[in-house]
């Protein structure tokens, strides 16, 4: 967990650094296969009564499946995030604002990290741009050479 004691913000802003392990509860129920711990470096600041702005750099690596050959693909993720946390009930419907309980003493940054990482992963992964995929007849990986069944390679 990457939690911040909001009482420390009385001086303006604080540095937020840490790591989230792939087993962190923030990633439960999310379709992300993290390979390494996610590193987080940022700054959190109080912007108004119950409003907090967080600017951070997040880096990690996820594993996915090539949409052509079904092989493993490892994708480095290195993103910059800027989010607003607010206890204002009028911002609850705003998708760009993370809700915060009124009078909250702690802020868990894990949910924001998880959601921003999930959005940063490309929807369709390929192991390489020229991936030949699988044979439509026998399922052989055409990246390994011509398939044994002799099916002509399909052009995409």
Image (cartoon, helix red, strand yellow):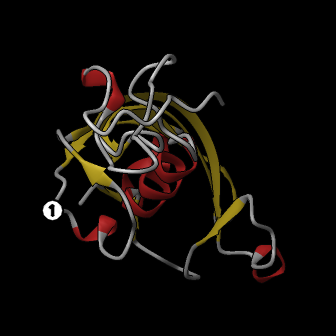
Q: Is residue 142 visible?
A: yes
The image shows residue 125, relative to residue 25, as above or below, that is above
Instruction: Classify the position of the N terminus by image quarter.
Output: bottom left
Residue at 43 percent of width and 35 percent of height: 133
Q: Residue 69, percent across and down?
A: 37, 39
SS for callout 1: loop
Q: How many marks?
A: 1
* Farthest right residue in view: 90
Q: Is residue 35 left or right of residue 115?
A: left
The image shows residue 72, relative to residue 136, as above or below, that is above
Q: Residue 130, percent across and down?
A: 49, 16
Q: Nearer the viewer, residue 45 or 142?
A: 142
Q: Is residue 67 left or right of residue 81?
A: left
Q: Nearer the viewer, residue 56 or 86?
A: 56
Residue at the disc numbered 1: 23
Q: Residue 111, percent across and down?
A: 44, 63
Q: Quadrant of residue 82?
A: top right
Q: Is residue 21 left or right of residue 151?
A: left
Q: Nearer the viewer, residue 145 or 53?
A: 145
Specify few, some or many for label 1: CA neighbours under 10 Å numbering under 14, 14-19, or 20 or more: few
Q: Is residue 40 visible?
A: no
Q: Residue 127, percent across and down?
A: 38, 27
Q: Quadrant of residue 48?
A: bottom right
* Farthest front residue in view: 150
Residue at 39 percent of width and 64 percent of height: 31
The image shows residue 112, relative to residue 60, as above or below, that is below
Residue at 34 percent of width and 46 percent of height: 70
Instruction: Classify the position of the C terminus by image quarter.
Output: top right
């Amino acid at each position: 967990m990457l939690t911040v004691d909001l009482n420390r913000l009385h001086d303006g802003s604080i540095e937020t650094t840490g790591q989230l392990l792939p087993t962190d509860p923030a990633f439960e129920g999310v379709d992300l296969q993290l390979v390494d711990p996610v590193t987080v470096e940022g700054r959190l600041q109080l912007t108004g009564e119950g409003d907090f702005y967080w600017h951070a750099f997040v880096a990690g690596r996820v594993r996915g499946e090539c949409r052509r050959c079904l092989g493993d693909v490892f994708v480095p993720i290195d993103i910059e995030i800027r989010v607003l946390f607010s206890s204002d009930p009028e911002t609850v419907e705003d998708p760009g604002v993370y809700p915060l309980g009124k009078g909250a003493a702690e802020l868990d940054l894990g949910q924001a990290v998880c959601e921003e990482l999930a959005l940063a992963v490309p929807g369709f992964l390929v192991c390489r741009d020229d991936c030949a995929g699988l044979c439509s007849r026998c399922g052989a990986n055409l990246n390994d050479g011509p398939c044994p069944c002799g099916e002509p390679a399909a052009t995409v």
